[in-house]
Image: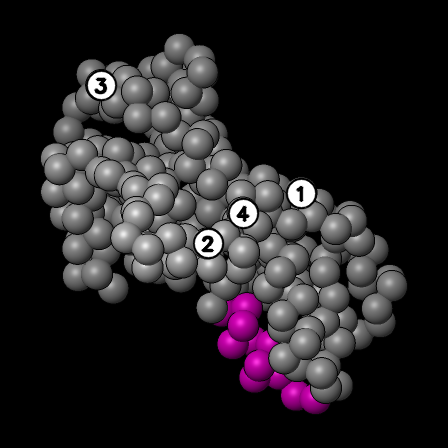
Amino acid sequence: CSMADMADIGQAEEAWTVLDQIVPGRVTPVTYMNSTAAIKSLTGREGGTICTSSNADGAMRWALEQRDKVLFLPDQHLGRNTALKMGLGLDDVAVWDPHRDLGGLTEEQIARATVLLWKGHCSVHQRFLPEMVDAVRARVPGVRVIVHPECRQEVVEKADEVGSTEGIIRAIEASPAGSKWAIGTELNLVGRLGIENPDKTVVFLDRTVCFCATMNRIDLPHLVWAMETLLSGVVVNRISVDPDDAKWARVALERMLQIA
């Protein structure tokens, strides 16, 4: 996942050390599911939780009950949209750039911010722009626009609805026959919803075809190859997680389930 790659564990540990010096004991980490095991481990070890796009607001609300600040990573857009949904303002959030000293912020900005957003994003959802919403409304009269919260804030503000992957699926399925939808999320899901809901008009928000390159590496030929190889007694592409990382990542995941 390109988003997960934007939060390197070395950078995250350095950021946590700096924050603990400037605002000691005041930050709770909240990490999106699209992240590495090492980042999840850091989150669990430092008293934080994991979230999905469906429960991000609950996770952030819980985190702010523990301490008065949140470090949200690795997706700045989901973090910002969640904070605004909870009633916080843009003045309450600040973007932490891991490639710059102090995240590109001053100590005063760090102390003032309620939510610090890791400078990461989904490569697909960041493609959607506000003018695409205007264009699809002109192209498809009566269309409703629904987007994923990984989209930019400006796109979310223009949309009719915002929903997680599950939320988007439910919205389309529950809508009446003849409904028209423009969806701002990964194209495979949009195509599938169009096929499964033939009585509705379902279009992609962006007229340019853009699949998630990393997600599309998971395909049927490779799945069949992996299963056939396993049947022959050979394990391919084994994934191993450091036991300590696994321990603390599990703690963070279990916190998420308890919060939910």
Q: Earlier in the sequence, mark 1 or mark 2?
A: 1
Q: Residue 71 or 255: which is nearer the viewer?
A: 255
Question: Residue 253: where, in percent of width, then height?
Answer: 22, 52
- Amino acid type of disc 2? Trp
Contact, mark 2 vs mark 4 (Cβ under 8 Å): no
Q: Which mark is residue 225?
A: 2
Residue 20 visible in the displayed image: yes
Please name the amino acid that badge 3 sits on.
Thr
State which tag comes first along the sequence, 1 or 3: 3
Look at the image and give the residue range highlighted in magenta: 167-177
Nearest the eye: 182 or 117: 182
Q: Residue at x 60, y 56 (%)?
A: 185
- The residue carrying mark 4 is 217
Question: Residue 26, position in %: x, y?
Answer: 19, 32
Q: Main secondary structure of the magenta part?
A: helix
Q: Residue at x 37, y 14 (%)?
A: 102
Name the residue tied to disc 3.
Answer: 17
Residue under numbered circle 1: 127
Which comes sooner in the sequence, label 2 or label 4?
4
Identified at 60% across, 55% down, the residue is 186
> Could you say whether the residue bearing mark 1 is in a helix, strand or loop?
helix
